[in-house]
Image: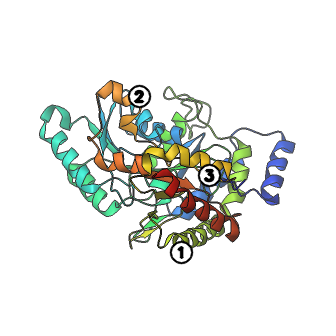
Amino acid sequence: MIRLSFPSIEEDDLNAVRQVLASGFLVQGQHVAAFEKAVADYVGTQHAVAVSSCTAALHLSLLALGVGPGDIVVVTAYSWPATANVVELCGARPVFVDIQPDTFNMDPNCLEDALKRLMADSAQRARVKAIIPVHTFGQMADMTAIMELAQRNEVPVVEDAACALGATWQGRQAGTWGTLGCFSFHPRKAITTGEGGMIVTNDPVLAKRLRALRNHGLDPDAPSPDFILPGFNYRMTDLQGALGVTQMKKLDRIIAARRRLAARYGDLLQGTPIQPPAVPPESAHVYQSYVVLLPAEVAPRRAELIATLKAAGIESTIATWHMPMTTCYRRKYGYGQGDFPSADQVFGQSLALPLHPDLLPAELRTTIGSLVSALPKLTQ
């Protein structure tokens, strides 16, 4: 089977985890602190706060900003549901913004329109508490335009950089443009700790609040235990921290391999009706996933195509979710087809192909060959 994704686990990773297990100190400790420092140093922020998942990272980021019942958070329409779910879990309302059909990221023009509508209503203006752009599949959103709009409207930005550790926009690292940036270490990401997340920021007040929120409200700076707010158990284990430290040492190598494979995919797709991912000149993509757009006439039979590829020994899947059209948000807010036309198109036509550093050139050729040969049968 040509796997969709496969984590890059090597002997140093296994040894690091063995050593923590042998020590008997398994919960958040020195290895988590070392992992936090490694990530902060890599992206160039003053603080990094490790948590149990990127969902936890997004949730705590909104809580640290004071998002609560009745508030509004502006989010992209196309992402894993966690991006909007954390808004609802704070008691707030997600306001969705359509995407650019080529990069799959939040469209700054649609963001501007949404902010104009929200800010025109004096009753709503003060309730707009954050903007969450997503760096979809490892490519950064247009943060120049998004930050200009955010600053003009005095709204903080939380970057959902779950897929984008190591990606840059105009040479600046993902996670460092907004007030807070959130990363994931799920096994499908470039580096993994099994599950796990990280929040980066340059704000020391927010960093302290985040550290308290992740650990039952325990004051991280108090000389003796003191609980200063009601918090969660969103801690990362030291097993994960140790694995994260060794994984960080190979991040650049893994990203380079993913970029080489993506370039090879691009070469193989030339002259086919399949659209490869678009990468603006300002962007350095890390290709957490390699997502193509199928011809429009094939889209209604995408599930059949995925099954055909699986029968040929090739894993593939839909890319991610059109959040307003999931049952949860469609029922609650009444969204329908046409409300987010670019997300409608991309969700219907996108397909994630195998991508991980261990893929062989012959496997890439087999994947594209099988994909292209299956298309005519799906348009008959």
Q: How is the image coloured?
A: rainbow
Q: Label 1 crowding class (10 Å Cα cut-off): few <14, some 14-19, many 20+?
A: few
The image position of residue 58, as x and y in percent, is 47, 41
Q: Measure how far apart labels 3 and 1 are at the Cα level.
A: 20 Å
Q: Is residue 64 above or below residue 318?
A: above
Badge count: 3
Q: Is residue 359 above or below residue 112?
A: below
Q: Secondary structure at mark 3?
A: helix
Question: Is residue 160 visible to us here?
Answer: no
Closer-to-camera residue (290/175) = 290
Give the residue drawn at x 62%, y 33%.
224
Q: Which residue is label 1 attached to? A: 267
Q: Which residue is label 3 attached to? A: 309
Q: Label 3 crowding class (10 Å Cα cut-off): few <14, some 14-19, many 20+?
A: some
Closer-to-camera residue (239/143) = 143
Q: Which residue is label 2 attached to? A: 327
The answer to which of marks 2 and 3 sits earlier in the sequence is 3
Between circles 2 and 3, the one closer to the viewer is 3
The image position of residue 158, as x and y in percent, is 40, 48
Residue type highlighted by circle 3:
Leu
